[in-house]
Image (spheres, grey):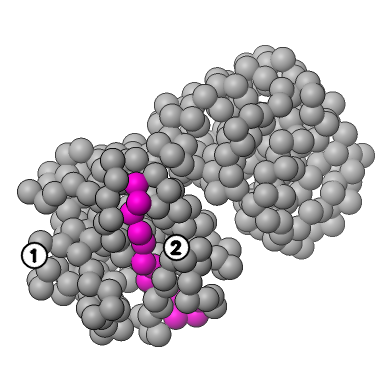
Amino acid sequence: MTTSAQVTCITPGLPPAIDGVGDYALNVARQLRQDFSIETHFIVGNPSWAGTKEIDRFGIGQVSERSVDRLWSLLDSNSQKTATILLHYVGYGYAKRGCPFWLVNALEKWRKVNNNGSLVTMFHELYATGPIWASSFWLSPVQKNLAVRLARLSDRCLTSHQGYAQIIHELSSGKHSQIPAIPVFSNIGEPKQVPPLAHRPRSLVVFGSSSNRLRVYQRSLSNLVLTCQQLEIEEIWDVGPPTGLDLSKIDGIPVVVMGKKTAAEISAILLNSVAGFFDYHTQYLAKSGVFAAYSAHGTIPIGIFYNALQMDGLEAGKHYWLADRPTARLSLEVGQAIADNAYTWYQSHNLSVQAKTFATQLLSQNN
């Protein structure tokens, strides 16, 4: 299938900013161009974003302030006739409190004058929840209302989590019944071949944001130590922004603080490691770029228990190991089976597969 379709993609950020959604949006655009000749024009919904006006020959516009008028002017500009919009939605990416009224209001205005236009929304998040003493508790109804408006405004929707797909169906009052739930892909690349664990150095990686890695070292330290003992780990590689911790050694095992690295460098690190450790809610692993990276590189994904609910085709003990609830003693042989299962699971929704799903949604005719 080939086409000369043009898509306007709204995203909260793009490189060089560290932004998982922005990286995701750019990788999708690259694959859509390569596989389907679909060209993308980006609009960055963050006035503080510091980047160029073009990446990989993709044109980029940017709101100078978060307002209906500023976004509308970019959508309505003569140089960019917007017939199809792909929105990467995460409320907190477009507003400090996760309530981007300006974004939804502008899209409603665009819809009124573009009856034949298409709005395809990728819901990376829906709305926050939390205890009564947290701001998220009080903001949740407002965020949910915006998600309702956006779901009903959209012609087609996608998401990265099965649970979200059901919620979107309900929020849209049944308008959307076929909602692809596609787990995120690896933003640091997808190696065509991965070496067996027995051929790799006995290294373990802790990769991700500062907060995610802090949870590993502060909340899951004993489980990390046990994992290292069972796999006979010789080095721990810490990859990501600074945590503020002194990580020279853990239980006598040297910790190599790698800092921020390029995607290619991180990919090489993972291919030379036997395991990757995470402390992330297992119910939402399909949304985790870190889990996707571990899976795509054939490492053993190792986390800790959150709850027994398993979704998106993932099973504890089969696609990832729970360090605090082991079903057997972890060995390289046991880990190899888990790494193989995670790798196979990942291939069903890799970047090429996802680009095909996005192309189908973007090129479909509105009813």
Residue placed at 23% from the left, 69% from the top? 82
Whether residue 48 is in magenta: the answer is yes
Q: As rendered, which of 138 and 48 lies closer to the eye?
A: 48
Q: In which quarter of the image is the N terminus?
A: top left
Return the mark for residue 276: none
Left or right: 366 in relation to 229: left
Q: Write down the region rendered in magenta.
A: 36-49
Q: Compared with residue 206, is residue 209 higher up or lower down, i.e. above or below?
A: below
Dot in front, 1 or 2: 1
Q: Compared with residue 245, is residue 317 higher up or lower down, i.e. above or below?
A: above
Disc 2 secondary structure class: loop
Amino acid type shown at disc 2: Ala
Residue placed at 25% from the left, 80% from the top? 77
Judge whether residue 23 can be spotted in this image: yes
Q: Which badge, 1 or 2, is on the more N-terminal residue?
A: 1
Residue located beneath label 2 in the image: 134
Residue located beneath label 1 in the image: 115
Left or right: 212 in relation to 173: right
Task: Please tell me in which quadrant of the rendered image residue 142 appears.
Answer: bottom left
Residue 327, percent from left and from top: 62, 16
Amino acid type shown at disc 1: Asn
Residue 361, percent from left and from top: 25, 46
Q: Residues within 10 Å of mark 1 (few under 14, many from 20)?
A: few
Residue placed at 54% from the left, 75% from the top? 51
Judge whether residue 324 can be spotted in this image: no
CB-based contact (under 8 Å), mark 1 and mark 2: no
Residue 181, percent from left and from top: 33, 39
Whether residue 32 is in magenta: the answer is no
